[in-house]
Structures are given as C-alpha cells and as structure tokens.
Image (cartoon, rainbow, N blue to C red):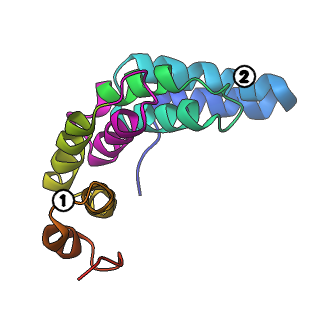
Amino acid sequence: MTRAGPALVLALALAAAVGGRASAQILDDDLSRMTEAGRAGVQVKEAADYIGGLNDHRRDPIRGCEIAEKAAPLRGDAQLLVGDCYRFGYGGVQSDSRAQEAYEQAVKMGYEPARCALASMLLVQSRDHERARALCPTLAAPK
C-alpha cells in the first residue's frame, strides 16, 4: 500500500469539504503542481490525459509529450508515451528512429507493453519480423 503525500491528502480533504466542480479544480491544481515538481508518476498520468484529452483535460498532445519527456528517464510507461509521441507525431515531430529508441528504452526498463509497441512498429515498417515475433508473440506476423 502506498502512502499519499501531504499535499494530496490536503487536496482530497479540501475536495471532500468543498464538493462539486470546485473540488475537482482544487485536485487538478494540486496534480499540476506535483507534475511541475517532477513527480514522475503524476507526470505520466498528466501526459496521457493531455495527449488523449482525458479527465477534463483539453486535448493538448504537444504539452502531453513535453510532460512525458520529463518522466521518461525514470519510467518505462513514460518512455512508451514518448515513443508514441514520435511515432505518431503527437508532439509536433514525427520520427520513427526516435520512436524506436524510446520503445527500446522502455523495453530495457522492463515495461512489458512497450514490447508489443516496438514489435508493431517493426512489423509495419517491414523490418525484422523475427525480432517482432520474439518481442510480442501475440502479434500475427507473416512467416
């Protein structure tokens, strides 16, 4: 079981006391502060929310990709997001080589979903089908 930090506990207590939309805004403000303070787990959540326009965030993939870059040195899930940013051009720059580097790093960090993302990329680009099958056996690869 993880412990909530004092700022999050305060935000949740205020949210319960205030109720309604104001409580969500207080919590969002606190999450934004934690994102800026370099909390990698919060950064990953915020990045995904901005990229996808989730949880009352306006869709802003460029901001989401910038946040993911901050957390990437510490977290494989952030590396996967960075890979997606480059692969699909969410951050404004499309680069298959940088996407592959990010996916490779996520795999090295032990983040299992990155294995299939990397394998999918290798298959789509008609490169190294054998390695793609080894990375993600659940993908249907040509023989």
In the picture, the quarter occupied by the N terminus is: bottom left
Type of amino acid at the residue the image marks with label 1 = Arg
**In the orientation shown, which residue stands out farthest toward the right?**
20
**In the orientation shown, which residue stands out farthest toward the bottom?**
143
Q: Which residues lie in the magenta part?
A: 70-94
Residue at 30% across, 76% down: 141
Residue at 22% across, 34% down: 98
The numbered mark at residue 89 is none
> On the rendered structure, is 126 left or right of 78?
left
The residue that mark 2 highlights is 25
Is 139 in front, or is 104?
139
The numbered mark at residue 127 is 1
- Residue 45 in percent (x, y) is at 49, 38
Is 5 in front, or is 122?
122
Above or below: residue 31 compared with residue 33? below
Q: Main secondary structure of the magenta part?
A: helix
Query: Is 90 inside the magenta-drawn segment?
Result: yes
In the picture, the quarter occupied by the C terminus is: bottom left
- Residue 75 in percent (x, y) is at 27, 42
* N-term-proximal mark, 2 vs 1: 2
Query: Is 103 inside the magenta-drawn segment?
Result: no
Calculate the distance from the C-alpha at mark 2 to the C-alpha at mark 1. 47 Å
